Image (cartoon, rainbow, N blue to C red):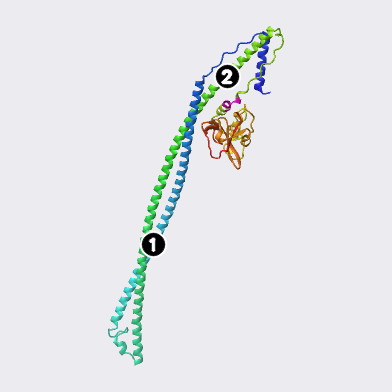
Amino acid sequence: MPSGRRGLTVSTLALVILFGAGGTGLAAPPPPPNPSDSELNSSKAQANAKAGEVGRLTNQLAQAEQKLSQLQDDVELKQEEANKALVDLQSAQDAAAQAENDAKAARTQADAAAAAIEKARNDLKTFAAASFQQGSTVGSLSAYLSADSPKDMLARAQLLDAVGGDRLNALDRLQQAQTDKSNKDSAARKAAEIAQQKQDAARKAKDGADAAQTAAVTAQDNQQTQNSALEANKSSVEQQLYTAQAKVNGLQGQRQRYQDWLAQKQREDDERARQAALGSSGGGGGRPSAGPAPSAPAGASIEAVIARALSKLGMPYAWGGGNASGATRGIRDGGVADRYGDYNKIGFDCSGLMIYAFAGVRSLPHYSGYQYTAGRRVPLSQMRRGDMLFYGGAGGIHHVALYLGGGQMVEAPQSGLRVRVAPVRYGGIMPYATRLVG
């Protein structure tokens, strides 16, 4: 027999023995506070309003996180563009330096060719002048007159022609070389100008890329500041929600204790009436019989289920944690949960929270896939407060939450987070809700 039932039976027997021994019942203790319906409704309305505000801020934060992610992508893109611009600038600078070196070499070659041509031209002038001077062995008339024979004179004439022709040919070749060198010099200067233009364009592109990267980082920082402010606002409203929910739970607890007091008082009144009837009929000496069977557990109602789940808001997520009695230490999974240290936390996972919430209704297995088939399944269009919502796909079910109504649910989300109220997410939701009560 569970300890709670055993304690209730012992208490009842004690009351019965006292009634039988004394013939009269003990007076019921003073009634506990009984909050009014308006107080209960007002506190629930405040909690629902805070839950709605939390949901709104959660949506805003989700949008802000998405924008921050996009800005992060943009920063990474701008960083890569800045890297490209830096590489292009370095290549342009190298090309400009090489083009300038080539231009200098071409100018040097052109200058050397011009100097050689000038020297050859001067040599030719000297040769021409010497050929008209007397006594010269280069090409004068004496070169012919001093010949020993006509044959010798002809040979000397041919030699003079050859020497003059070779010098003229050399001069032509030098002039052609000068033309080639000048063309190369002109092409090298043009290449240097183009390389300089490309270098200037690359430097301008790098300046633009650096400016774009700076702007992207600034936008990211601004968005991060907005996200931090939203997160702080959300945390503040969540604390207000927890306070409002605690107030609801406190008032509901007071109402439950008052109802328990009324039930106890009714049992005592019934026992007094029974004892009086036995006394008037002469049968008062016997042992009194046991009182009526206790009423159904308070946890059997939808509101009791929800109150139990909401009472654990803020508890850590611990994979494998939670049972019908409350939070337990998580277990190792060899993966994500271990990295978050769930095995060292006292808390709930998603299915463990459902086990605790529905403890007064029925015993649930510690696996969301089995919980999905634990009750009557209804289409999502017909879901109502107190139904379980499941998430999964072809690979199976991986998450469960408790629907609160008004588009809100309570859940133990994932490692690193805490039990919370959140807007119903429809991405990946299973087509049916599971109903255990009603």
The reply to whether the magenta stretch includes residue 175 is: no
The label shown at residue 257 is 2
Residue 123: give x, y in percent of width and height.
31, 77
For the point 51% across and 25% down, which residue is it?
44
Residue 335: give x, y in percent of width and height.
60, 40
Q: Quadrant of the C terminus?
A: top right
Figure quadrant of residue 273: top right
For the point 42% across and 47% down, which residue is it?
213
Residue 237: give x, y in percent of width and height.
47, 30
> Disc count in the image?
2
Figure quadrant of residue 343: top right
Look at the magenta stretch and give its main secondary structure. Answer: helix
Who is closer to the viewer here, 376 or 68? 376
Q: Is residue 104 above or below residue 221?
A: below
Residue 341 visible (yes or no): no
* Residue contact at pointers 1 and 2, CB within 8 angstroms: no
**Which is nearer the N-term, disc 1 or disc 2?**
1
Report which residue position mark 1 lands on: 99
Please state which amino acid type lies under the numbered disc 2.
Arg
Q: Quadrant of the N terminus?
A: top right
Mark 1 surroundings within 10 Å by alpha-carbon count, few (fewer than 14), some (14 through 19), many (20 or more): many
Q: Is residue 406 above or below residue 36?
A: below
The secondary structure type at the circle numbered 1 is helix
Span highlighted in magenta in the image = 299-305
Rounded to the nearest angstrom, the CA distance separating label 1 from label 2 is 94 Å
Please state which amino acid type lies under the numbered disc 1.
Ala
Please give left or right for residue 186 compared with residue 425 in the image: left
Residue 195 visible (yes or no): yes
For the point 35% across and 82% down, which residue is it?
163
Figure quadrant of residue 388: top right
Please give left or right for residue 425 compared with residue 157 in the image: right
